[in-house]
Every structure is written in C-alpha cells, then in structure tokens.
Amino acid sequence: MEKKNQHWADETAAKIIAEKGDKDRYTCASGITPSGTVHIGNFREIISVDLVVRALRDRGKKARFIYSWDDYDVFRKVPKNMPKQKELEKYLRFPITMVPDPWERDENYARHHEVDVERMLPLVGIYPEYLYQAKKYQAAAYAEGIKTALEHRDDLKVILDKFRDEDHKIQGEWWPISIFCGHCNRDDTEIDGWDHVWGVSYHCNLCGHEETVDLRATGGVKLGWRVDWPMRWAYEQVDFEPAGKDHHSQGGSFDTARHVCKDVYHWEAPVTFRYDFIGSKGSPGKMSSSSGAVIDLADVLRVYTPEITRYLFAGTRPNTEFTISFDLDVLKIYEDYDRIERLAWKVEPAKDEAAYQKARRIYELSQVETMPAMMPYQVPFRHLCNLIQIADGDTEKAIQTLTGLKPEQIPGLRQRGERAKYWAEECAPEEFRFRLRPPGLTAELSDAEKAAVRDLRDRLIARITDYGDDKSCAEAIYKIAEDHQMEGKILFRAVYQALIGKDQGPRLANFIRSVSKERLLAILAAY
C-alpha cells in the first residue's frame, strides 16, 4: 500500500515516480568537490537525498544513492583553515587528487576530506555508493561523453550563452574540455585541435609540453563543469538530484545543465528541488574542529545525537533557511525533538490524526536505522546537563540517579549524556556552568544570610524526601525567606553562593532535589 504524502520527502518520491515512470530502480544523486572541509551546508544536500531515498524505499521501490566526489577538479585556492599553506600553494592548478595531504594521514588532499565524511555518514544512517571522478576520468570511462561534447561544440556554446547577457557570452574559439598537462600536471593548457574522432592536441603554457592524446586512453582530458554535470546525469541515468539555490538561480548551472542533458545527451534532466543555506549560532566548542568559520558534521554530532541531527533536516523543508545553534537554543531543539517523540509514540496526544501522522513521519525519518523497539527514556537536556555537573562531569554516575530506566534505553541515554557533558563544558554560556563546592569551603555571606541558609539546611534539606515535587519544595524555600523577613531572591542568591559559588544557577527547588541529601548537608555544615 502506497504511503500518503505526509512529508516533503514523500512528496518528492511521488513526483519522481510520476515524472520518471514506474522503473525497476531509481537513481538519486549528490556530490561535491572535496577542495576543503565538507561543511554542514554541504551535508544538507546529502541528507536531503537520503530522506528521498528512504521515502522511495518506503513505497517499495528500489533506489540507488550515488555520491560523486568531484576529486578531479582543479585545486584553485588554499582554504584558510588548512595547515602548511606555503606547501599547498605549490600545487595550485593541479587536480586535487595530486595535492599531498598536509596532515600526512591519507594518500592525498582530496582523499583526506573524503575520508572525514565517509567515516561520519554511517553515524547518521547514510550509506551512499561513492563515485570517485578522478578514477572515472583516468580510466577514460567518459570518453564517449567527451567525444559527444566535442561533436556538439557549437550547440553547447549556444546553450551556455542562452542565459548570458552580451558582456558574458563566450568569445572566440571555445572548447568544452580542459586538459591537465601530461608533463607538469597543471591545467594551464590550450587546445590546438581535434581530429573529429578520438585525438585531441594541446600545448602547455607553463612548461611548453605538447602532445596529441587519445580520449580512450588518457585521463588528462576533462569536461567543463556545466557540461560534465549533465553528461554524468545521462551516464548514470540520474532520476533525482537537488541543488543549492545558487545553482537553481534563473539561468544558473541547473538551467543550462537541463538543456545540455536533453539536447546533447538525450536524457531528461533529473527531478530536483532547491535547498537553502544553513546558518550557525554560537560556537560548537571552545575552538571549532575546523579552527575557522567552517562547521562540519563532526561538530554538530558533538552537541546533537544522530537522531536529533537528522531531525534538524527532516523537520525542515529544504527550501527553508535555518540555523544550527550551539548556544542556549540547543535546549529548545532537544525539547522540540522530545515532543515529536512523545507524539510519535502517542505518549502525548496530538491535536488530530493529521498532526499525529506528520509527527510520526518526521520521527521515523529522524531515526538512524529503523524505529526503536520501545520509546527512548526521556530526560530534559537541561536537567541532564545539571545532573552531569552535579556528578562533577561523571555521565555514568548521573545516569545512575535516574529512575525507571530499562536496560534497552541505556545506550541512547548514554549518547545524550555525552552530548550534554560536552555542551555544558564547551559550549554553554558561563552562567549555565557550575560545580558544587567541596565541604568546608564557604561563601562570604552576611549573618542574616547564614542564619537563613542554616534554617534551610535544617528544616528543608534534612527532610528533603518529604517534598514529592518541585512546587512544594519551592514553597518551602519561600516560607523560610518569609520567616527571616528576607526577599526570596536574597535567599536564593545566598544558597547558590553557598552551594556553587555563583549568584544564580539551576532552578533551586529542582536542583536541591537532584543532589544527594548527604552531599548538601556536608557542604552546608560549615554554616
């Protein structure tokens, strides 16, 4: 039975089937040039394709997810966040697979960035089939496609000029290819001729090398981007590929690629949609993993669980710009996900069936693999951060204080605990962080404040188990302040100073109910 269009990924899957017809398999594509850190904006395209692939498979369709590493592109500039800048500059205009890895971890610069992504994607349940364009070109896999482009050189020029104003139209002799010099490896070459079959002649402007190469045997000839992209759509028979709004601008690369694909390579361009940019708010740590303004998937996964990372994208339409936060908004994002989870498990009632179905579908698509066997244990992220700080950063010790936890729920809770610890220690604003004072270390309080703190210790904390909820505990705190003819906020400040050495902290009633009675009494014994 076919799923209803409950989600934008389902709507896209339905559109692919409607436009491409009933096929044995649908090919969905994504790709990028690994010329630097693959940032979280690039990840939006990857996960958008993954969500559509899942939607197709949920309809009983076979779907192939190909991810192209455009690692035969030219190394045009050295990103600012790369080490060994001077060394890398020596390889400008080389194919990026011929640039050495400045970290000396992988066989080349491109492979380093590819490995960083390929190691992370399984953590969020994404398993593409990787295509390495350097290997494809060097194996002469696209010889026919290149020959076709050369045969339609004049047609391609007309298509590419169609959306350009007079000042930007192609001038003079133009070729749809570039060639990496067989001697110095750079692409500062000029085409001298083509024999109208397989032979292309060129000379290098840098080293003077000249030769005629056979398209069927050489890996040095490469199509320009606006021809290469549609050629590969036809070669791989791509049915769906999204693109950023820069490519989807009127007259942009997608418009020209659509014409090239149909008119030159005789393949209908893939179904597509435009995805928007992603901003960031706050810092993913004391220092970004990229030591620059680039945030990648690894940064996000330090703060958000894999399910919530997926939720950020599954819960937002692709053409909507949004911000990934690392500041206090993290608390709200966890709250929003937890509510979707409660709705999906019918622990919290939805306003109607449509609202339930929407929440359920977003939740399904947010899971790394399949739906869990039981609802995960929910503890608010804010509270978990507090528990971990109370436990002096010991996540396991904090988890042990929670009640009603089933063994199957522990791994997921542990993942959330790791993020809570990292966020509280590395990202949270200073006012959110605290450590309990060791016994014997006292705060500078007035005599009146000390008397009120002693009273709170002896009347409330000594019998804290009598208070079954935060409300009754908070009322008792205010009663003590009233008995001492003291404003509530004055007593609150005194207690915070006595316990954590700050003027403010977590909600006091919940806080003192979360710390063991013995520990609180030991800290306050000196008063």
Image (cartoon, rainbow, N blue to C red):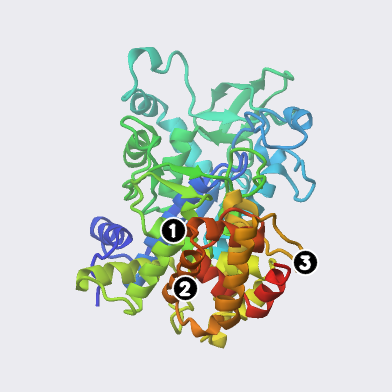
Position of residue 138 measured from the top left corner of the image (x, y, whole percent): 63, 44
Look at 32% across and 65% down and name the residue there: 23
Q: Which residue is mark 1?
A: 333
**Residue 292: image tag:** none
Residue 27 visible? The answer is: no
Kind of residue at disc 1: Ile
Q: Amino acid at mark 2?
A: Ala
Question: Could you classify mark 2 by the number of other residues whose Cα lies within 10 Å: few (under 14), some (14-19), or many (20 or more)?
Answer: some
Position of residue 492 measured from the top left corner of the image (x, y, whole percent): 53, 60
Identify the element where label 2 is drawn.
Answer: helix
* Front residue of 483 and 116: 483
Q: Give the residue pinned by disc 2.
A: 476
User: Along the line of sight, which residue is nearer the eye, 19 or 156?
Assistant: 19
| Residue 96 falls in image quadrant | top right
| Dot 1 or dot 2, earlier in sequence | 1
* Residue placed under numbered mark 3 in the picture: 440
Alpha carbon distance from label 2 to label 3: 26 Å
Residue type at tag 3: Gly
Q: Give residue 130's quadrant in the image.
A: bottom right
Would you say the residues marked 1 and 2 are in contact, meaning their CB atoms lie under 8 Å apart? no
Of 26 and 198, the residue lying toward us = 26
- Marks 3 and 1: which is nearer the front? 3
